[in-house]
Image (cartoon, rainbow, N blue to C red):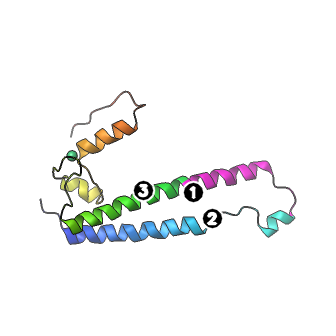
Amino acid sequence: MTIDLSLMRQRLEAKQAELQKNISGLTEAHPEPVGAIEASEGPQDTEEVAVDFLETQQEQSLLVNEQALLTEVQSALERIENGTYGKCIDCGQPIPEKRLEAIPWAARCVKDEERLEERNLSITETYDEELD
Ligand SMILES: [Zn+2]
């Protein structure tokens, strides 16, 4: 196991900064569809309102996703501080380096992550086991 912790920290901090920027962008630039110009053009057509509504919904769910990811990134940074980085938070087994390189904030080994996802997606009945 030769994880470069300082490199990982850099990547996590960069991701953290990026997410914080996105989140503040999403929070501040909240769409106000009825501007002065639009209002003077008479009644808004309902289709446009629906699209605006949909966009707001999408931005909201994006915001939720970004915030969840930010929490994961911050927990990973904490694990670097605590010296527990790179270990599965469920079983304590080392997380494969390849996985951490792809997802530096990964908190679980593949097996436990899949188990968690399976639990979350309980609707999914068929589960294809992928073997490397
Ligand atoms: Zn595990």
Which of the 4 image quadrants contains residue 121?
top left
Q: Which amino acid type is shown beneath numbered disc 3?
A: Ala
Residue corresponding to mark 3: 68
Q: Is residue 56 magenta?
A: yes
Q: Which mark is residue 59?
A: 1
Q: Secondary structure at mark 3?
A: helix
Residue at the left extreme, as displayed? 1
The N terminus - image quarter: bottom left
Residue 69 vertical position relative to residue 132 in the rendered view, above or below = below
Q: Amino acid at mark 1?
A: Glu
Do residues under tags 1 and 2 come within 8 Å of each other at their CB atoms? yes
- Residue 130 lies in what quarter of the image? top left
In space, the residues marked 3 and 1 are separated at their CA atoms by: 14 Å
Q: Earlier in the sequence, mark 2 or mark 3?
A: 2
Considering every residue shown, the one lying at the far front of the view is: 82
Q: Which percent across, then down, holds residue 28? A: 59, 69
Residue occupying image coordinates x 31% and y 31%: 128
Identify the amino acid type marked 2.
Answer: His
Magenta region, residue range: 41-60
Q: Please tell me how crowded label 3 is: few (under 14), some (14-19), or many (20+) other residues with Cα within 10 Å.
A: few
Whole-angstrom CA distance, mark 1 to mark 2, is 9 Å
Name the residue carrying label 2: 30
Total number of numbered discs in the rendering: 3
